[in-house]
Image (tube, coloured by chain):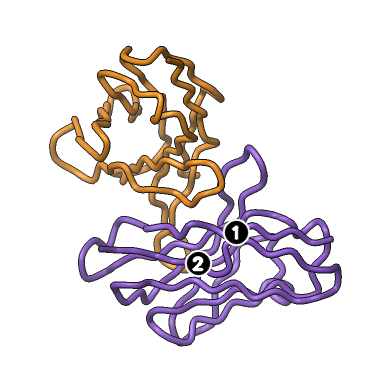
Amino acid sequence: GAVVSQHPSWVICKSGTSVKIECRSLDFQATTMFWYRQFPKQSLMLMATSNEGSKATYEQGVEKDKFLINHASLTLSTLTVTSAHPEDSSFYICSARDPGVDPDTQYFGPGTRLTVL
Amino acid sequence: AQSVAQPEDQVNVAEGNPLTVKCTYSVSGNPYLFWYVQYPNRGLQFLLKYITGDNLVKGSYGFEAEFNKSQTSFHLKKPSALVSDSALYFCAVRVFNNAGNMLTFGGGTRLMVKP
C-alpha cells in the first residue's frame, strides 16, 4: 500500500516552454501532497504543500507564479513549471501521506528529472 | 528551529561489517524522526520511524535505529552490510508550519559498501 507515482519520469524541454508533472496516489486518498526539489548530491528542499481543493502553501523563496500547483482531486496533484529556464533543471519529487493508515509517514514518488535546454 | 543534522557526507564499510549512519536532532518537544533511503535517480523509500515507545526501532531491509534522548541522536544501524545497501540515506524530522506538518531533511549521507 501507499504507492505514489509520478509522470513523466524524465522530460527534456526547450527554454521558455511549460512542463507539467503529475503526482498520483495509487491506492489511497491524499488530502495533502508535497513537492520537493533536489539538486545533484544535495538534500530535498520542500517547495510547497498541496492541499486538495485549496491553494498550495509555498515555502519562502519559491515563486508561486512559476511553479503552479493544482490539487484537483484526492489522488492527483500537478506541478507546472512555467516558462522553464535552464536553472529550473532539477529532480522534482512529490510525496503524500495516507491519513487513513499512517498520518505521520510521507511516501514518495520516484521523481521526475527535468532538463531545460 | 527544528532540524536534523547528518555529520557525515559519506560512510564507507566493507560488506558483512556493521554499519552506522549518524543523525542528530534539534527539536522542541517530542520528536517524530524518520529514515529514508534513496537509490540513484529514484524517489525516497521509507525505512523506519520513531514516534514513541521503544528506543530501538526496527525497519525495512534489516535496518534499525536507536533513539537516544540524552544525546539527541537517532543513528541508523545494520548488523551486516550488503553491497546493495549502497545508497543515499536521509534522516528527517516532522515539523509544523502554517500548512500543517511537514518533513525537514538532513543533508544526506552516502553509504558505500564495498565487497
Taking the view exactly as shown, the residue that stands out farthest to the left is: B54
Say which quadrant the N terminus of chain A sits in.
Answer: bottom left
**Which residue is at 60% across, 73% downward?**
A79
Q: Which of marks 1 and 2 is in front?
A: 2
Say which quadrant the C terminus of chain A sits in.
Answer: bottom right
Residue matched to label 2: A6
**Which residue is at 44% across, 69% downward?**
A33
Please name whichever residue, B34 or B29, is drawn nearer the observer in this view of the structure: B34
Corner quadrant of residue B102:
bottom left
Which chain wears purple? A
Q: Position of residue A71 (x, y in %)?
A: 49, 81
How much space separates mark 1 and mark 2, taking CA atoms? Answer: 10 Å
Q: Which amino acid does label 1 sit on?
A: Tyr
The mark that comes first in sequence, 1 or 2, is: 2
Residue matched to label 1: A92
**Which residue is at 42% across, 43% downward?**
B92
Which element is circle 2 on?
Answer: strand
Circle 1 crowding by C-alpha within 10 Å: few under 14, some 14–19, many from 20: many
Which element is circle 1 on?
Answer: strand
Circles 1 and 2 on the same subunit: yes
Circle 2 crowding by C-alpha within 10 Å: few under 14, some 14–19, many from 20: many
Is the residue B18 above or below the residue A9 in the image? above
Is the residue B101 above or below the residue A79 in the image? above
Number of numbered markers: 2
Q: Chain B is drawn in which colour?
A: orange
**Which residue is at 54% across, 63% downward?**
A35
Query: Mark 1 touching mark 2, by CB under 8 A?
Result: yes
Q: Which amino acid does label 2 sit on?
A: Gln
User: Left or right: where does residue B76 sit relative to residue A60?
Assistant: left
